[in-house]
Image: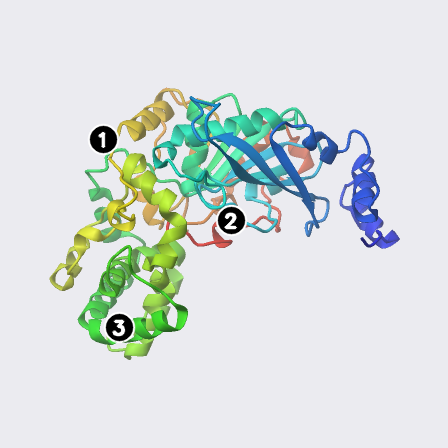
Amino acid sequence: MRRVTQGALALLLAAGVTGTAVSAVQAVQTGAPAQAGDVAVELKKIRGLTVEEKTSNLPGYRWFWLKYKQPVDHRRPNGQWFEQRIMLQHKAESRPMVLYTSGYHTPETMFRSEPTALVDGNQVSVEYRYFSPSRPVPTDWKKDTIWQAATDEHRIIRELKRIYKAKWISTGASKGGMTAVYHKRFYPRDVDGSVVYVAPNNVNDREDSAYDRFFASVGSDAKCRAQLKDVAREFLKRRPAMLKRFEADAAKNGWTFKYLRSMDRAFENSVMDYEWGFWQYKLQSDCGTVPAVKASDDELYKSLDEIAGLSFYTDQGLDPYLPYYYQAGYELGAPNPKFKHLRPYLRYESTYNNARAYLPSSIPVKWDGGKAMRDIDKWVRTKGTGLMFIYGANDPWRAEPFRLGKGSRDSYYYVAPGMNHSGRLIDKLPAEHKSKAIADLLRWANVSSTARTRSTVPSDAVDPLQLERPKL
């Protein structure tokens, strides 16, 4: 392995990597054994943890890929087990730790979430159970539950706190934000504060009129809303032309349609995602990019693919997200806007956002009647402490948000004007709210406010949702 140059050591020192950390970097890159007390040595002492250090591309950080042995069923810890994948970005044992929960796969590149950048801390990113490769074989899908996942995170935190004894903050966006809330509901003392981005709260899965009201009023441009609806109808009116292009792309990319049973169903689900996808990923300032109803078939198809993502409803698109759809069918529920303007042209309306339709018949699922979500919602409103909820004003997932109640303590709710489904929204809050949010986060993390400008988010903070594009 190549040696560290004097210039590289200077860069590490400038970035704040000192003492044993520099010695450890030298040891890793020269092939010498790590010194006693080095974080790599300490990590390897944790029972059930496999440690691999990789080359870091973030100055001041070391990068570890970890695998931790977890029980499939935490109520029966001596039964089947699996290895859960974890990404650790180590800065210093004395710095705060940020637990990033994606709710899906863990991103496979180094990044600093907004809270991590603000507290200048370590970060550990946990892959959600049952997302490959963190999946037991054979797979007992009944153990893909929010409590089992929360207990995964609890065990990881318990072990890592042997090394990282400073304050802990949890964060996540979308399903990752939901995951952070669920973990805190069951293990409220594990972390000192939670920054939760764009997390939906589907308390009553049988009543989704909030989404219809959202799409009737989102933004301030009625012409934009009308244009999106008209174009979505036009896709369906030109179904043969759209399917011809979809078929060509499927042949080129090897896409198949066993889950939804036909390309036509996949196409229709994508069309029903068009209006939702625009407001989730775009801004109102992007309304000018929406094609005219009289645009060519090629222009319309390109817009549908760009915004809704035609590949998502193929087998290849759905397969990585089977654990999510199982959870949606069992505990989480899913939004079901009506999109009545499309009904004259729809053939398979009942399949849209229907978790059962996206799962193979080999994975049975039975809805819990909303029990889990009512429990979480009640806890947030009556006992939730140290919670910060942040939403984009124009994000469809804000239609049914988490709400604070009389029993919520040291908890806050913010909306970023004009913003979408982003995991980097503190920086987009109005100045007064932004300063307050940053101050509360620094207080939770026990980081002096004088150590960082209160109204500034470091420029290297990343929106994790842009590293991969799940539907939620």
Q: Amino acid at mark 1?
A: Gly
Q: Viewer-proximal residue, 49 or 399?
A: 49
- Residue 125 at x, y percent in the picture: 55, 40
User: Which mark's residue is nearer the viewer, 3 or 2?
Assistant: 3
- Spatial CA distance of label 3 from label 1 is 38 Å
Q: Earlier in the sequence, mark 3 or mark 1?
A: 3
Q: At numbered mark 1, what does the secondary structure look like: helix, strand or loop? A: loop
Above or below 314: residue 51: above
**Quarter of the figure with residue 412:** top left
Residue 242: image tag: 3
For the residue marked with disc 3, what is the amino acid? Met
Residue 308, placed above or below residue 429: below
Residue 120 visible, this orientation: no
Is 140 or 288 nearer to us in this picture?
A: 140
Residue 405's x, y, as percent?
34, 25
Element at badge 2? helix
User: Colour scheme of this structure image?
Assistant: rainbow
Tell me the crowding category of disc 1: few under 14, some 14 to 19, or many 20 or more residues within 10 angstroms, Cα based.
some
For disc 1, the marked residue is: 369
Q: Earlier in the sequence, mark 3 or mark 2?
A: 3
| Left or right: residue 388 compared with residue 24 | left
Given residues 259 and 234, the one toward you in this image is: 259
- Give how far across and how far down residue 417 sits, in percent: 40, 48
For residue 159, side relative to residue 434 (left or right):
right
Residue 331 horizontal/vertical position (percent): 30, 34
What is the CA distance from the residue labelled 3 to the residue labelled 2?
Answer: 32 Å
Residue 249, visible in the rendered structure:
yes
**189 left or right of 50?**
left
Alpha-carbon span between mark 1 and mark 2? 32 Å
Q: Is residue 358 above or below residue 249?
A: above
Q: Residue at (32%, 78%) from the top-left corner?
A: 298
| Residue under label 2 | 464
